Image: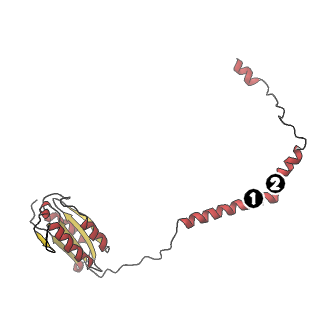
Amino acid sequence: VPLLVMLLRPAQQQDPALRIPFFEQLKQMTVLSQRAHRRLWLIRVIALLIWICLVMAASQPRWVGEPIELPQSGRDLLLAVDISGSMGTQDMRLERQMVTRLAAVKTVVGDFVERRKGDRLGLILFGSQAYLQTPLTFDRSTVRTLLEETPLGIAGGKTAIGDAIGLAVKRLLDRPSENRVLTLLTDGVNNI
């Protein structure tokens, strides 16, 4: 019941806490004219447009133009590299030092890749299983870098030459037959 009494009783009027005799004059001074409202609106719109332009400039948009068709006159070379456990055997000589078979392959293939200008290169790594490390690309430095960073035995300890050849055939099937090349770099025979 006290809640109903409080809600239903008439609202009390509050007297102003401070009486200003010249309140109407103050009120007229703060009211902007129609022209001043338009000017303020225009300034805000211009500020917003400037902000949008600054954000767009900070994003550094660039016109890249039409795509350039790369020449495809070279060969499509897939390099299948054995990274099985036996490639860790240190029985190869490179610059008067004994190195692993994989280190020798990385050096020789790295030099080969750098000379293949105009050819599309791909990289297949295989051990117990084969996988495509790099699809056919004109980016020789990526192929070389990915080969150099390949650890020994990541694809298993055995040698699945057949899987590597099968994967290469699958990847080269849709390319012109006169330009397809598979280079197989291994130290053993298929033992899977």
Please state which amino acid type lies under the numbered disc 2.
Leu
Residue 40: mark in rendering? 1
| The N terminus - image quarter | top right
Q: Nearer the viewer, residue 115 or 9?
A: 115
User: x%, y% of residue 62?
Assistant: 50, 72
Residue 78, given in percent of the width and then of the height, sits at: 23, 72
Q: Determine which quarter of the picture holds residue 16.
A: top right
Residue 147, quarter of picture? bottom left
Image coordinates for residue 61, horizontal then vertical, percent:
52, 69
Q: Are marks 2 and 1 in contact (CB under 8 Å)?
A: yes
Q: Is residue 28 above or below residue 161?
A: above
Spatial CA span between label 2 and label 1: 10 Å
Scheme by which the image is coloured: secondary structure
Could you tell me which quadrant the C terminus lies in?
bottom left
| Residue 162 visible in the displayed image | yes
Looking at the image, residue 139 sits to the left or right of residue 30; the answer is left
Query: Which callout, 2 or 1, points at the residue further toward the start of the chain?
Result: 2
Instruction: Look at 90% across and 41% down and name the residue there.
Output: 21
Instruction: Identify the residue position indicated by label 2 in the image.
Output: 32
- Dot 1 alpha-carbon crowd within 10 angstroms: few under 14, some 14 to 19, many 20 or more: few
